[in-house]
Amino acid sequence: MKSQITNHTVVEKLKKIGQLFSPAAFIHDTEENILKMESLIRNQFIGGITFFHSRYSAAANFEKRQEKLSVENTLEKLHLLIQRYQKISNTPLLFSIDAEFGLAMRIENSPQYPYAISLGAMSENNVELVFETGFRIGKDLKQSGIHLNFAPVADINTNPKNPVIGYRSFGKDRNKVSNFAIAMYQGMTSAGIGACYKHFPGHGDTDVDSHLGLPVINKNKSQLINEELYPFLEGINKGIDMIMVGHLAAPALSNGQHIPASISKEIITGFLKKELGFKGIVVSDALNMKSVSNMFAEPGMLEWEAFNAGNDILCFSENVKEGIHMIDQKADKKQIDESFQKIMQLKEKLGLHNQESFHFQGFDWDKHHAFNQQLTKEYISVISDKSSPSGIHLDLENRKTALVSIYKEKDNPFFKGIDPKSLIPKFGINQNQEFEFEKLDDFESVLIALFVPSAKPVNHFGLELGLMKKVGEISENKKVELYLFGTPLCLNDIPNLSNFHKIVCAYQDFEVVQIEAAQFFLEGK
């Protein structure tokens, strides 16, 4: 009898530890790997699953990108996996995803909302539109079976060389970042899903990608509190109940140690929980990221260190079984119980115990496009302007103006909106294409539409520097206006910007954005 009681106690403890784990599941994956996930659900009692598109796209999974799978019908496959995994779990699984700008961050053919940098271009008077964006994202996720969004990003983008935050941040003004982050958070939670501030203590002023290496913030504690930490402090004061801790070092908060915050007991337990008084759930950033995954040779040790530091949910563990064993051997029972209770309370709050299934009703694309158009009117911005009040004059009769589209076909919605009858000469420059710039010699003015290939700064945002040099040279003897469909962070890679008569940033290249940008141009704003 005593043996049975002991075994029962051991199993119950292991079940509690299992609830702390949220390993990665890939929507496009092999049946073999899906069965492995089912084994984790049945045998390790994991508490949740974090969905990614595929192993090919998963963060820091570079050396394992070998499977060639069909990537069609992603949303339908997600729904089937959710139902399949949930069906075999004794305790309802908490399904999470990174959907900072909507499901489209992970799932094709689903609603995409503007990047945070785009929303950050709006005035603070439009904070209600940020709330509405969060609410709509939350509704999309909830009806798709997702309970928790690892968003918003509350990092302040103070370092233009930052390789991993950039377009994901609301900007470099701490007050705007703080106000927009809480609005996004509250919008999502109002829709009935969980939300999570990231990446504590602030990933904005770094120039190393934590997917690959360890960024270090060399600031004193006072500077951190006034800068990086400000949005998090404001969020805590306003009642946020979940924070993701990043893989970055802040020696001023960890007794001078260059240790990732995500495994620092001084930062999570000592500073975040005790000094700042945060009572909510702490989530580790993905534990497969190179800044931490290469630190420990023994499987399970990283998971133990992350839990011991104070994380309640261990995201993207690649050693679940070993991690559970290590925590079982080393952890304090009180800490296990506290984290377990937090997770169960979150599941109760989100209605997981009363939820048989989700009810996907489809997306209202007309309303979605209309909302994106409404947002565009508020964030499309003039970056610089030294032109006459009317800007470029479209001389249709003398054909002195040329329209040049870079990295997208010349018959795009932007140019069609400007010139619906195709009376103006148009030119298109595609990737790796040699363009004879002499074709522009006879024109007095040029309107350039630059569709930035990538939102990420790697390889200069996908811009070809030789081509950008030639683009800059056009402005030496012509009147040039540049409409940028992408991040303005790429402007440093375009020479002679001071010669441009006008630079307008539309931030995104959605069709509704291009149409609105055309109207913006025609109205001479």
Image (cartoon, grey):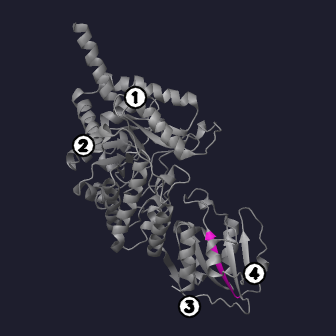
What residue is drawn where x is 62% and y is 72%? 413
Mark 3 or 2, which is nearer the eye? Answer: 3
Residue at 45%, 29% (x, y): give it.
319
Callout in the foreground (4, 3)? 3
If you read the primary sequence from the N terminus, does the residue marked by circle 4 or circle 3 appear first?
A: 3
Q: Which residues are magenta?
A: 444-450
Res 120 seen here: yes
Badge 3 or badge 1: first in the primary sequence: 1
Q: Which residue is mark 1?
A: 301
Dividing the picture into quadrants, the one containing residue 153 is: bottom left
Q: Is 452 in front, or is 221?
A: 452
Callout 3 touching callout 2 (CB < 8 Å): no
Label 1 vs 2, first from the N-terminus: 2
Q: Earlier in the sequence, mark 3 or mark 2?
A: 2
Picture disc at residue 390 = 3
Residue 270: numbered disc = 2
- Is 237 included in the stretch rendered in magenta? no
Kind of residue sitting beneath label 3: Ser
Coordinates of residue 65 in the picture (x, y in percent): 61, 39
- Circle 1 SS class: helix
Q: Is residue 113 above or below residue 525?
A: above
Q: Is residue 449 within the magenta segment? A: yes
How far apart marks 1 and 4 lie (CA) works out to 62 Å
